[in-house]
Amino acid sequence: MADEDILSLDNGIHMMWATRNFNARQPNTMLIDHALGSMGISLPAAIAAKLVHPERKVVVLTGDGGFAMNSQDLETAVRLGLDLIVVVFNDSSLAMIALKQMVDGYQRYGVDFANPDFVAYAHSYGATGHRLDDPAKFRAILDQAAAAGGVHIIDAPVDPQQNLALMMEMRSVDCQKVLAGGGQ
C-alpha cells in the first residue's frame, strides 16, 4: 500500500496482527475504533473514507464476526461504484471473545458459528469474491482486486493456533493452558 492509502480495521485478534505489522506513515491512514471495541465498524468506515478520498486505495481488514455485523453495507459500496477490498479473516468464531472467556475462567459459549460462502455472498451483492486457499497467493489476489476495481471480498481462512501464538507472545493469556486442552 502507498503511504496515503487507508487501512480500515475492525476489532478482533486480526486487529492485533495488523497494528503490529502495518506502519501508518501519514495521519488518518489507519482507521480503528479502539476506544469502544465496536465490532462491524470497518466496512462503513472504509466506505466513508473512500467517499472522502476517492483517489486512495482503501482496504478493510475484518474478522468474520465483525463482517457479519455490517456486511449489508456491501450493497452501499456496490451501488456507489466504490473501489474497496475487504479481507475477511475466517475462523468461524469470535476468537477474541473466546480468549477473554477463557482468561476469565468461563466456558466457551456462543462464540462458534458457521459462515456463509463469502465468495457467493460477495456475488449476491454484485461484488467479486475470492477465496484464499494458499497464503502465498495473498499478494497476487490483493493486486488483482486493486487493478480490477469495484468491491472485492477476500475470504481468508485463519488457523486459530496462529492467534494463540500471538497471544502467547503478547503474554496476555495463558496459552499453555489452552494448548494443553484447558480451553480454546
Image (spheres, rainbow, N blue to C red):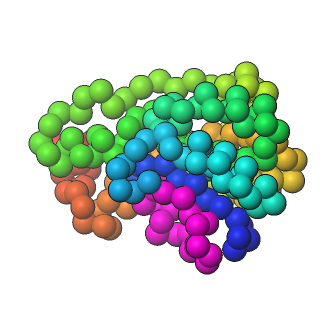
The reply to whether the magenta stretch includes residue 79 is no
Residue reaching furthest to the right? 148
Which residue is rendered at x = 44% and y = 54% of the image?
33
Residue reaching furthest to the bottom? 25
- Note whether 81 is above or below 120 in the view shown: below
* Apparent side of residue 98 relative to residue 138 in the rendered image (left or right): left
36 and 139: which is toward the camera: 36
86 and 176: which is toward the camera: 86
* Apparent side of residue 29 relative to residue 64 in the rendered image (left or right): right
Image coords of residue 180 (percent x, y): 21, 48
Residue reaching furthest to the front? 52
Would you say residue 162 is visible in this rendering?
no
- Note whether 172 is above or below 130 in the view shown: below
The range drawn in magenta is 14-32
- Note whether 8 is above or below 63 in the view shown: below
Quadrant occupied by the C terminus = top left
Quadrant occupied by the N terminus = bottom right
Which residue is rendered at x = 81% and y = 60% of the image?
55
Image coords of residue 144 (percent x, y): 83, 51
The reply to whether the magenta stretch includes residue 24 is yes
* Apparent side of residue 147 relative to residue 184 in the rendered image (left or right): right
Which residue is rendered at x = 34% and y = 46% of the image?
96
Image coords of residue 160 (percent x, y): 41, 46
Q: Quadrant of residue 5?
A: bottom right
* Apparent side of residue 167 relative to residue 141 in the rendered image (left or right): left
Would you say residue 71 is visible in this rendering?
yes
